[in-house]
Amino acid sequence: MCLRAFHPKPLLAFFSAVLLALLLPLMAPAQAYVGKPKLIVVVVIDQFRGDYLQRDRAEFKGRGFRLFLDQGANFSDCYYDYANTKTAPGHATIGTGAYSDGHGIETNEFWDASRSFEHKVSSVEDERYQLVDLPAASIPANQPGAPDDALKYVIGSSPRNLRATTFGDELRLGTQGRARVFGISLKDRAAILPAGQAANGAFWIDTASGQFTTSTYYMEHLPEWASAFNASGRVNEAAREAKVEGTTQFFELVGRTPAANRYELDFARALINGEKLGQNGVTDLLVVSLSPNDIQGHQFGPDSDSEEEMILSLDRDLDSFYSWLDKTVGLKNVWLALTADHGIAPIPAEAAKLGIHSGILNTKILYAKLNTELNSRFSPGKKTEYLLAGADLPYIVLDKRAFEKAGISEVVAEEALAALLPADVAAQAPQPDGPLPLQHRLAPAPQVAGVYTRLQLAHGQLPPSEMGRVLAHSYAEHGNWYVMLLLDAYQMAGSGGWEGTTHFSPWSYDRHVPLAFYGAPFVPGEYHERVAPVDLAATLASLAGVNQPSAAVGRVLTEALKPTHAEQQ
Ligand SMILES: [Zn+2]
C-alpha cells in the first residue's frame, strides 16, 4: 500500500492538488459573488415593450442597452402575469415583487368608496399631504401663496394605497434605516410606488413648469441640491431642446421628446451627488422611471419613427449616464436592473390594415346602452345611472348605491351586467368608419373574450387555466362592485376615432417587457426562460441578503447568478 504513494500518478495528482489549493484563492474572487454593492439603480422605461431591445439591437452603440445585452444577464421573455397592464400597478409590481392581489393597486385612477363617489382618486393622491416648493405660477388655490388666477386644486401624494413593502423598504428595514432609497419620474405614481413606504424621497415634476417637486409625506422642502437643479435653468434647456421654449405644458410637450429623458437622467445625477448615494457603507437604491417613451408612444404607436428615435436616443443617454456612474461610484460597485411597467398594442388601424381582428369599443355608447337595459330590468321608466363614470378597462365599476336603492344585491347586479356585455360590445360592429382591411379580410369588430365579476375574482371562481391565474393576480378592491371586461386581442376602448393606442389587457404585447441585470453577481448571457417582473425584487432581495418584500411572489433567477464563494469551496 505504502509503495503506491510513490507511484508517479498519485504524485502528480498530489502536486496538482497543492497547486490548485495555492491558486484557488487567487482565482476565486474573479468568479465569486463579491458582496453587496454600494448602489443599485433600477431603470424602468415606461411602455417599453419587450421586443424593442431585439428589434433595434444592431443599432445600439456604447454602454447603453449594450451593457445589458453584451455584459449583463438579459431575460428576453419576461411577461407580466396579470390582466391590468397599466402604469401604477406595473410600478408597484416592480417594487413589491407582487401583483395587484398582493400590492392592492389595480389601475392608475380608481373609484374608492371610502373616499369619494364624486371623483376617482389617483393611485397616489393623498389629501393629508401637500406638494412641496412648487413654482409660484403652479401653486394651486388650496395652498398659501397661490396666484389670483390659480384654478387647480392640487393635493399631495403618498404610497397610502400600497399594501405591500418594496425591495427598497426591506433594504431600509434590513439596515435599520441606514440604506437610502429614492424614486424619480416625470409621473408621481411612477416615482412613489416602486420606491415604497419607507423611501427617503420620491421626486416628480410639476406638469406645467417641469420643475421637480415632492410631497410633505417625505419632506417639508426640497433638498438644497434639488432646489439648485430647479434654479439652474436646466428646465428651460430641456424645453429648448424639444423646440417648445417657454411652454406651460412641459409634461405633454417636452415630456414626449428624448429631451425629457436627458432631463430626468440629469436630475438622477444631481440626486446621486446630492444625497451621496453609494457612500453610506450599505447598499443604497435609486429607481428611475423614464416617462417620455410612454407619453409619445400613446400618440404615435410602437412602430412609428418617433418610437425609433426615442429608443436610439435613449441608448445614447443611458450610455452617458452609466459612463458617468462608472466615473463617480464605479460600475464595479453598482448593480443595474432594466425593465418596464407594461408594453403597448400597435395602433389598431395599422393592425387592421394587415388583417388583424382589431377594433375600437366606444365606451360612451356602451355605458348608455347598458344603463338603458339595467333601467328596464331594475327600475322601469326611470333613468338611473347604474355605472360610475369614466370607463377604465379592464374594469367597469358599478354604482352600488343605485343598485342598493333598487334592492339589488351585488351578485345579481354584477351578473346582470356581465350577461349584457357580450351582445352590447358586439353591437358596435361592423365598424365601417374604421380603416379598410386587406381584401378578403374581416372588418374591425370589437368582441368580448371574457367577463368576470368582482365576486368571482374574490372567491377564486375562475377557470383552471393560464387566464384564470392571470385574472386572480389582477384582483384588488376599493369598496366598490365591478366586472372585468376582456376584449379580444388588439382591441381597445376609444371615443370613436382610430388615432393613438394604449395598454390595459391580458394579451402578450401589453405584458411583454425587458428584464435585464448588470453587475458582479450575474452571469452574462441571453436567457429565454419565461420569467416575470416580480422576479426582479425577489432576485435583488436574495442577493442583498434582506427579506423578500412582504407580498413577494417572484422567483430568484438562480440560472443567471454566479456561484457564491462558499458554494465554490
Ligand atoms: Zn406606463
Image (cartoon, grey):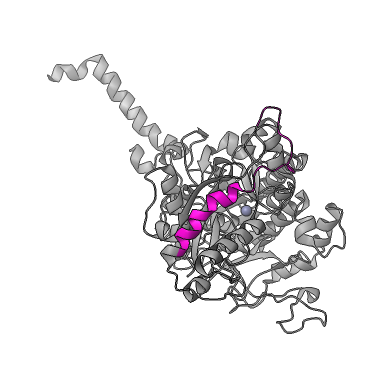
Residue positioned most to the front: 381
* Residue 93: x %, y % from top left: 51, 55
For the N terminus, give its image quadrant.
top left
Q: Residue at x 70, y 82 (%)?
A: 142
Q: Residue at x 62, y 33 (%)?
A: 54
Horizontal placement of 118 versus 2: left or right?
Answer: right
Horizontal placement of 125 versus 452: left or right?
Answer: right
Q: Would you say residue 348 is visible in this rendering? A: yes
Residue positioned most to the bottom: 144
For the C terminus, give its image quadrant.
top left
Q: Nearer the viewer, residue 436 or 486?
A: 436
Q: Residue at x 26, y 16 (%)?
A: 9
Q: Is 440 within the magenta?
A: yes
Q: Would you say residue 476 is visible in this rendering? A: no
Q: Is 366 within the magenta?
A: no
For the magenta stretch, what is the residue range? 413-441
Horizontal placement of 552 versus 378: left or right?
Answer: left
Count of numbered tags: 0
Q: Nearer the viewer, residue 157 or 121?
A: 121
Q: Nearer the viewer, residue 146 or 479?
A: 479
* Residue 350: x %, y % from top left: 71, 38
Instruction: Please say if 483 is above or below 332.
Output: below
* Residue 92: x %, y % from top left: 53, 58
* Residue 324: x %, y % from top left: 68, 49
Instruction: Please say if 216 is above or below 504.
Output: below
Instruction: Please say if 138 is above or below 433.
Output: below
Horizontal placement of 241 versus 204: left or right?
Answer: right
Residue positioned most to the top: 8
Residue positioned most to the left: 1
